[in-house]
Image: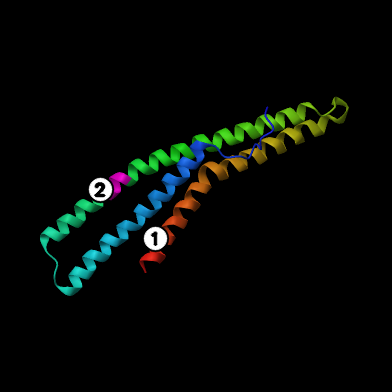
Amino acid sequence: MTNESPFRKNRAFYIGVMLTVLEGILSGCSYLSVYIVLTALASGTITAGMVGAVTAGLVVIFLLRLVIYSTGYTQVQIGGAAVSKRLRLLLGDKLKKIPLARFTQGQVGQYVNTMTSDVGSYEKILTHSSGNIIKNAALSAVLVGFV
């Protein structure tokens, strides 16, 4: 095991984060098309061609979002799992260094349960929650910038 931090994120994680931010920005573009249609409707300049163009634009946006989100989500999952793997290996090595005399019947289970539970919670935050938080932050930034 190297001396690098087990919490250090890897390239797959950062790629997934960047794609998630891009997907959040594209999510905000959906609202822009609704704004375009409502503005044209209010001013009386709406045409069937405009509605078709906006609809085609929405289809392209949703297809891009589908590809970007699935790739980004997968990359965040892979990157987060690699981080938690390093952390589990580090904790396993630390657990091996504890003298056997320190283990009593009740403490072994407590050590292992705490280790797996805490690392599992950290992994869930990395692989599931971080993507949603980042995406919603990017969407909020786009909507605030739009307003």
Q: What crowding class fits label 2: few (fewer than 14 Cα within 10 Å), some (14-19), or many (20 or more)?
A: few
Q: How is the image coloured?
A: rainbow
**Which residue bears the numbered disc 2?**
60
Instruction: Please report the bounds of the magenta region as a residue range.
Output: 60-64
Residue, disc 1: 142
Mark 2 to mark 1 CA distance (whole Å): 19 Å
Name the residue located 39 percent from the left edge and 49 percent from the top edge: 22
Q: Quadrant of the C terminus?
A: bottom left
On screen, residue 36 above or below 19: below
| Residue 72, x across and y down, in percent | 42, 41
In the image, is residue 79 part of the stretch drawn in magenta? no
Provide residue 12's location: percent of width, then percent of height: 49, 36
Residue located at (48% from left, 47% from top): 131
Amino acid type at mark 1: Val
- Image quadrant in which you'd find residue 88: top right
Report the side of 98 relative to 35 (left or right).
right
Horizontal side of 22 relative to 132 (left or right) equals left
Front residue (pair 119, 86): 86
Instruction: Characterize the local packing of mark 1: few (<14), some (14-19) or many (20 or more) Cα atoms within 10 angstroms.
Output: some
Which secondary structure lies at badge 2?
helix
Could you tell me residue 138's position as x and y percent? 44, 56
Magenta stretch prevailing secondary structure: helix
